[in-house]
Amino acid sequence: SDAVHSLQQSVEAFESIEPPPLLAPLHRDIEKMMLLRLEGYELTLAGWEAEVTATPSTHFERAEKKLEEAQAITMTLNSRLQEVNEALHQARSRQVQASSR
C-alpha cells in the first residue's frame, strides 16, 4: 500500500537522524512509535488479505495490540513535548526580560 510505503520511507529517514544526546530518549521513543504503527499497518493489510482468502489468522488482533502500544507511546510523547515547549517558552521569556534590562 502507498501508506505503508510512505511510512517505511519516513521511518528510514527518521532513523538516519542523529539526535543530540539530551533528545536521544525522545528520539528513540518516536522511532519505536513509528515502527509499531508500521507493524500494525502491515498486520492489518495481512489480516485483510487473509480475510479475503478466507484464511484464519490473528493478524487483526496483533495489529490492534501494536497500534494500541503506539498510541500509548504517542500520548506519552505528547506530554513530554508539551513539557519541552513550556521549557522553551520560559527560556524565551527569561531571555526577553534579560535583554530589556
Image: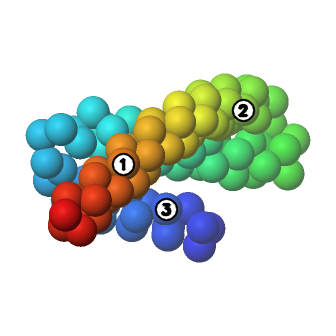
Alpha-carbon distance for marks 3 and 2? 18 Å
Q: Which mark is residue 90?
A: 1
Which residue corresponds to the image point at 14% horizontal and 48% vertical from the top-left?
20
Name the amino acid type tagged 3. Answer: Leu
Name the amino acid type tagged 2. Answer: Glu
Residue tagged by mark 3?
A: 7
Image coordinates for residue 38, horizontal then vertical, percent: 52, 49
Name the amino acid type tagged 1. Answer: Gln
Which residue corresponds to the image point at 55% horizontal and 62% vertical from the top-left?
4
Q: Image quadrant for the N terminus?
A: bottom right
Q: Nearer the viewer, residue 7 or 42?
A: 7
Q: Residue furthest front?
A: 101
Image coordinates for residue 3, horizontal then vertical, percent: 60, 67
- For disc 2, the neighbor class at 10 Å (few under 14, some 14 to 19, many from 20) is some
Q: Quadrant of residue 14?
A: bottom left
Which residue corresponds to the image point at 33% horizontal and 39% vertical from the top-left?
26
Q: Which mark is residue 33?
A: none
Decide if residue 11 is on the left or right side of residue 57.
left
Q: Nearer the viewer, residue 42 or 11?
A: 11
Image coordinates for residue 99, horizontal then vertical, percent: 19, 67
Which residue corresponds to the image point at 40% horizontal and 64% vertical from the top-left?
10
The answer to which of marks 1 and 2 sits earlier in the sequence is 2
Alpha-carbon distance for marks 1 and 2? 39 Å
Residue tagged by mark 2?
A: 64
- For disc 3, the neighbor class at 10 Å (few under 14, some 14 to 19, many from 20) is some
Work out whether residue 33 can be spotted. no
Above or below, 41 relative to 73: below
Which numbered disc, 3 or 1, marks the residue closer to the eye?
1
Q: Quadrant of residue 40?
A: top right
Q: Determine the secondary structure under disc 3.
A: helix
